């Protein structure tokens, strides 16, 4: 039986085009060495992927802010799955 640990992580982004700053709450599902990422209940690319676009101007010139600039969120749930 593998144990899946789900952790919510808040990631902050900065658009280099319009200077908009926003946050997104991802759920990281850890199972051994594998991690599955979800955003708004949908499977997603990792938060640091270059596929992130600005919600204000749709630009792809987006930087992920360093972890020190993001709030830390404690573990939320642990579930066991077969």
Image (cartoon, rainbow, N blue to C red):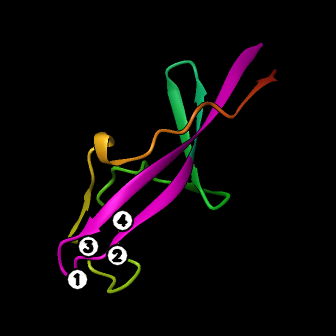
Q: Is residue 3 left or right of residue 58?
A: right
Structural distance between the alpha carbons of marks 4 and 2: 7 Å
Q: Residue at x 22, y 76 (%)?
A: 19
Q: Which residue is mark 1?
A: 18
In magenta stretch: residue 31: no
Q: CA distance from mark 3 to mark 1?
A: 11 Å
Secondary structure at badge 2 equals: loop
Q: Residue at x 68, y 34 (%)?
A: 76
Rendered location of residue 59, percent (x, y): 27, 79
SS for dot 1: loop
Mark 1, other Cα within 10 Å: few <14 / some 14–19 / many ≥20: some
Circle 2 residue:
54
34 to the left or right of 29: left
Q: CA distance from mark 3 to mark 2?
A: 7 Å
Q: CA distance from mark 2 to mark 1?
A: 9 Å
- Count residues near mark 2 (Cα–Cα under 10 Å), then give few for <14, some for 14-19, many for 20+: many
Dots 2 and 1: beta carbons under 8 Å? Answer: yes
- CB-based contact (under 8 Å), mark 3 and mark 2: yes
Q: Earlier in the sequence, mark 4 or mark 1?
A: 1
Question: Are dots 3 and 4 in contact, CB under 8 Å?
Answer: yes
Chain part drawn in magenta: 1-26
Work out whether 16 lies above or below 56. Answer: above
Instruction: Give me the C-alpha separation between circle 3 and circle 4.
Output: 6 Å
**Which one is in front in this view, the residue at disc 4 or the one at disc 2?**
2
From this viewpoint, which residue is outermost toward the top? 1
Q: Which mark is residue 52?
A: 4
Residue occupying image coordinates x 33% and y 50%:
48
């Amino acid at each position: 039986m593998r144990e899946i640990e789900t952790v919510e992580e808040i990631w902050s982004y900065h658009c280099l085009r319009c200077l908009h700053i926003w946050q997104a709450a991802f759920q990281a599902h850890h199972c051994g060495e594998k991690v599955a990422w979800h955003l708004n209940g949908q499977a997603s690319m990792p938060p640091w992927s270059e596929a992130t676009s600005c919600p204000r101007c749709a630009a792809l010139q987006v930087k992920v802010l360093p972890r020190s600039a993001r709030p830390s969120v404690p573990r939320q749930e642990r579930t066991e799955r077969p």
